[in-house]
Image (cartoon, rainbow, N blue to C red):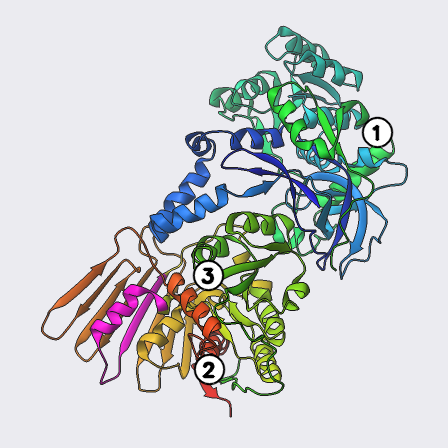
Amino acid sequence: MKQVVQNYKSGELALLDVPVPGCKPGGVLVRTAYSLISTGTELMKVSEAGMSMLGKARSRPDQVAKVVQSVATNGVPATYRKVMGKLDSYTPLGYSLCGVVEQVGAGVDDVKVGDLVACAGNEHALHAELNWVPKNLYAPVPDGLAPRDAAFGTVGSIALQGVRQGESRLGEVALVIGLGLIGQLVAQLLTASGVRVVGADPDPARCELAERLGTAACGDPASPAVESAVAELTDGHGVDQVYLAAGGGSNQPVELAARLCRDRGRVVDIGKCRLDLPWNAYYEKELDVRFSRSYGPGRYDPEYELEGRDYPIGYVRWTERRNLACFLDLAARGRVDVGPLISHTAAFDDAVETYRRLGDGELKAVAVLFRYPEQADEADAPAGAPTVTVPAVRRGGKAASTPVRAARTPVRLAFVGAGNYASSMLLPHLAQRDGVELSTVVTTTALSAANAQRKFGFAEATTDLDAVLGDDSVDAVFVVTRHSSHAELTRKALLAGKAVFVEKPLALTEEELAGVLAAVEESGNDRLQVGFNRRFAPLLLQAEQRFGPRTGPASLRYLVNAGRLDQGSWYLRQDTEGSRFAGEGGHFIDTASRLLGADPVSVYAVAASGNEDLQVVLGYPDGSTATIGYVTTGAAGFPKETLDLVADGKVLQLDDFVRTSVYDGRKRWVSSRLPKARDKGQSAELAAFVRAVRTGGPMPVPLESLVATTAATLAVRASLAGGAPVTLAEAR
């Protein structure tokens, strides 16, 4: 299928061939009939992409701050790879469309195949021939409303939410500053609710259009016409509400709002304009400044948008989806007329040229629609107890179906998932390695697969996992998806006879871990590696060698300054993705076990009150202990990982994988530095895995150790629940 994309680094726009998205549970697959270009938001994004790197940095200071923090935590090379990987990727455009349901995912019962729906979301309602849309981001189109008009649903919801924030009342007077697409819709919605509207925009054509659609008076904000109209309609008191629907860097809209608003009036910011509030003017009138967050309650909440968890109507009357349905109803009943707003309708195949004409100013428009062909050539998309038992690893059952590799042929790898970690920490190493062929990349979103194929040279990109697992030419499968899917995808790949590299964690529950081991037993295929890369870090191995063998028990302290996550991160979705420690704690347990030369036999965990900070004490067979302090409340500038190992009168120190020191009993010490990089072992780990697949030799880490580390990570939850140590008893 085709999709409109943009490279944020170069600014290039393209109509790209990408795989058809899969139809996941909780949503529907929609074939687009019309999609709407937001001539404000989208053109601003297109314009930013065309800026120099310095210009991009100036326009997004929030992202610059994140880059600075990443440098402090991960070092310059890793941060550079991550940033360049994000910039030099195709990003989608679009967020408002109407189309026909082609497939219905599990758990959806309010629409059926063939229904017409309006869809929202800058990750789901894209300028693409097919989109997967979760349940709370679509609404059925009422009878009698044309698909072309229903494509305005998202921008209509944005305007409607802004009006709701203004709390307009019958008979009031409002000022709408900025008569672009959103401003025109705000003015119509206010007029429909019995509010008299004055519009302000420097474009005479937009002013004329707004007056034709019911606005009482319009004019250039720099002229006396607007002020005169407000004085006449309000007897000189000023308007009850001001809606800021303008964009750009001028502070004029904010100043005009203060001048023309009555005492204790309301100012609602809907657009993205400069907001340097003149203090005296806003203070003296005691103006109420409000923000309107996009389509309404539910926006930016992954549980609402992605998992379909609605808010009870008794507590939240107007959610994203209910706003969308309401606007469609108003349009169907003729209370809002979007037809006159359509300046141009372009064939989807002409998308790139249409954006060029808009950007150059050749095409003057309030609203532009893409019209899609009725039939596309692509085929349809595919459809706590005190003792925890460490599951025993049993190999047997039927013989594994791993194909016999021909000598000297490249190792053919498939990737399931191609997110930030895969693209910045795994694929760059594999793409440069001799004897490796990147065969297929599988993702649920079409564009991420296309990006990975372009950047790393995969032979194919698809959303069909079963086709990859059934391909006998694929030697190994990398599972680099969200945590909740790791165990099931690993199980399927093992049963298909593939060698598997799965990023941590291997499993989030004891049941998931048992399912993976059942697949090993059934298939006889134990070719599994979990991405515990730190045990392969060159500095750690060098320090271990310098420390030498132990004769007595050791004491190990490992401080992980994990830091806080951004609000909205999927890592915080504990109900589906597990706790943060369940997701990444295996890294630190595996590192401790590597240095102590054994797997843990007991786990005791204590949590701090009110946050995710943990202290985890691991016991080992020879009496050694490892204490892992996992904290999220530390200083951002402090190193992320520091480790001390004490035994036999010696001390090993690891400082965030850039420096190691070993002190012996004669007070001598040696130190190694990597001042410009942190090598946490990914390259060496991948080399070991590829070598094992190529030669048929043992996996880099014994399966029994991978299982023990996973069981110990899961035992942390049992210890917290029971408030007592947990013994890890080996199954027989």
Q: Are circles 3 and 1 on residues that touch, CB within 8 Å? A: no
Relative to residue 18, is residue 599 drawn left or right? Answer: left
Q: Position of residue 609 (x, y in %)?
A: 44, 64
Q: Which residue is mark 1?
A: 335
Is residue 496 among the parts visible in the rendering? Answer: yes
Q: Which residue is mark 2?
A: 704
Q: Are circles 2 and 1 on residues that touch, CB within 8 Å? A: no
Q: Is residue 123 above or below residue 366?
A: below
Q: Are circles 2 and 3 on residues that touch, CB within 8 Å? A: no
Relative to residue 719, is residue 33 drawn left or right? Answer: right
Q: Is residue 295 above or below residue 365?
A: below
Q: Which residue is mark 3?
A: 610
Relative to residue 706, is residue 658 drawn left or right? Answer: left
| Residue type for callout 1 | Arg
Q: Position of residue 322 (x, y in %)?
A: 75, 44
Mark 1, other Cα within 10 Å: few <14 / some 14–19 / many ≥20: some
Q: Position of residue 268 (x, y in %)?
A: 62, 29
289 or 595, which lies in front? Answer: 595
What residue occupies the far front of the structure in this picture?
Answer: 407
Q: Residue at x 25, y 52 (%)?
A: 675
Q: CA distance from mark 2 to mark 3?
A: 35 Å
Q: Quadrant of residue 595?
A: bottom left
Mark 2 secondary-structure assignment: helix
Mark 2, other Cα within 10 Å: few <14 / some 14–19 / many ≥20: some
